[in-house]
Amino acid sequence: MRRSFNVLLVEDEAAWQEAIAALLKADERFVLSAVADCYDAAIEAFQRSRPDFVLLDWKIRGDKDGLEVGRQFLDMGLPAERIILISGSSPGEIPPHPYLYVPKARIAVELEPLLQSLVES
């Protein structure tokens, strides 16, 4: 039996939530365990769902961005290589961070292969 991996999605746009959920559903190994749209909801969802991977939008609702959420996840024991930053912004606009990165414009072609490579390594 194949192991399944819980994924937490931190994304504040409903259209992206739906699109990413559909991508994850295409591979039975990945289970969308929670969705959050702001810092506080992300921390609560992380504690509740204990995800294997986090898909993290840079710009989310509220006064704290996705990079701050990611730093909190690191402090809670999630390795940086289990956090995938997703953003519509260009890499040069995003402050330095230790996370993997997939641009939203390429999510349909890059996300699943990246997740597969992480679970197979």
Image (cartoon, grey):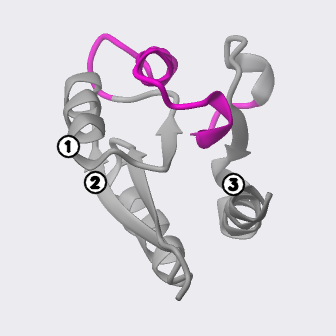
Q: 68 or 109: which is nearer to us? A: 68
Q: Which residues are magenta?
A: 61-90
Instruction: Inspect this view and state whether residue 87 appears.
Output: no
Left/right of residue 2 with respect to residue 36 in the rendered view? right
Instruction: Inspect this view and state whether residue 68 appears.
Output: yes
Coordinates of residue 13 in the picture (x, y in percent): 35, 48
Left/right of residue 115 with respect to residue 55 in the rendered view? right
Residue 17 lies in what quarter of the image?
bottom left
In primary-sequence order, the first of circles 3 and 2 is 2
Coordinates of residue 117 in the picture (x, y in percent): 78, 61
Q: Nearer the viewer, mark 1 or mark 2?
A: 1
Mark drawn on residue 105: 3
Q: CA distance from mark 3 to mark 2?
A: 23 Å
Give yes or no for contact between labels 1 and 2 (Cβ–Cβ under 8 Å).
yes
Q: Which residue carries the number 1 mark?
A: 48
What amino acid is found at the position of numbered circle 3 in the picture? Ala
How dense is the environment of label 3, judged by Cα within 10 Å: few (below 14), some, or many (20 and up)? Answer: few
Q: Under tag 3, what secondary structure? A: helix
In primary-sequence order, the first of circles 1 and 2 is 2
What amino acid is found at the position of numbered circle 1 in the picture? Arg
Q: Under tag 1, what secondary structure? A: helix
Left/right of residue 15 with respect to residue 104 in the rendered view? left
Q: Which residue carries the number 2 mark?
A: 34
Residue 41 lies in what quarter of the image?
top left
Q: CA distance from mark 3 to mark 1?
A: 30 Å
